Amino acid sequence: MDINSSHNSEPLHLNQWVVINRILVFYKLIALITGIISILLTIHVLYLSAQPPIVIESGKSGNHIVKADVTNPTITKIDLEEVTKNFIHLRYEWLEINPEHILVSLKPWVTTGLLKKIEKDLDELRLRNKKEHDGDGSEKNNGSNSSNSSNNSGDSKDGGSKTIKQRVLVNSIDVTEKSVKAEFDRIINIEGMKVVSTLQIEIEIIQGEITYKNPLSLYVNGVTEYDKD
């Protein structure tokens, strides 16, 4: 009886050992897989942390995804020339004197302080133009009242400000270590009559925040104008 019972218990113990061994192998496999996944996730996190941050810039035209550069971009002479040329066209060209439109176009490229100064200058220019041409129109109307009293369908062009268009032709841009100077012709068109004058400017360019429209982060911070006689 004892011998038979001992023989019967040996297979039972063997089966239990096999089951336990299988469970241990299963847990070892799970631990190995978990370790591999952890290593892969760690490598992925390190890779993402080394990438430049992504910035979502909101504007009137919608959202723009920008991958920011964590290093300062290298600024070249050509970059400064392009910034200067872009500023000249945005600041001194227009189909009509519309400060709001000009300021919106300039905003991504100039500092807040300079933008306020330009706004003041444009408002003064528009007001001066309106006063001058309103005055001319009133004088013409007063002088022609008696001769045109019987004609009630006359042209009213002189009743308001005349349309003034201005475009520019850049002659030269000189970039040095200390400053950026430019010379350009202003071609002013007043109701078909053209007047050309040459203007020289010296501008100060600084680096600021990188944006979607200004990836080089170059901003015009100051302008000095010199009329060329």
Image (cartoon, rainbow, N blue to C red):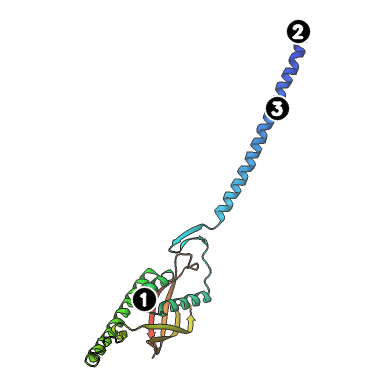
In space, the residues marked 2 and 1 are separated at their CA atoms by 112 Å
Q: Is residue 110 visible?
A: no
Relative image position of residue 203 (x, y in whole percent)? 42, 77
Identify which amino acid the numbered label 1 is placed on. Answer: Asn
The image shows residue 28, relative to residue 36, as above or below, that is: above
Work out which residue is located at the far top of the displayed protein and give it: 1
Relative image position of residue 181 (x, y in whole percent)? 45, 81
Relative image position of residue 222 (x, y in whole percent)? 39, 75
Residue assigned mark 3: 21
Identify which amino acid the numbered label 2 is placed on. Answer: Asp
In space, the residues marked 1 and 3 are separated at their CA atoms by 85 Å
| The label number, if any, that marks residue 2 in the structure image | 2
- Find numbered disc 2 in the image and state the secondary structure of the residue it sits on: helix
Relative image position of residue 75 (x, y in whole percent)? 52, 71
Residue assigned mark 1: 98
In space, the residues marked 2 and 3 are separated at their CA atoms by 28 Å
Pointer 1 or 3: first along the chain = 3
Identify which amino acid the numbered label 3 is placed on. Answer: Asn
Q: Nearer the viewer, residue 154 or 74?
A: 154
- Residue contact at pointers 2 and 3, CB within 8 angstroms: no
Residue occupying the point 64% across, 42% down: 36
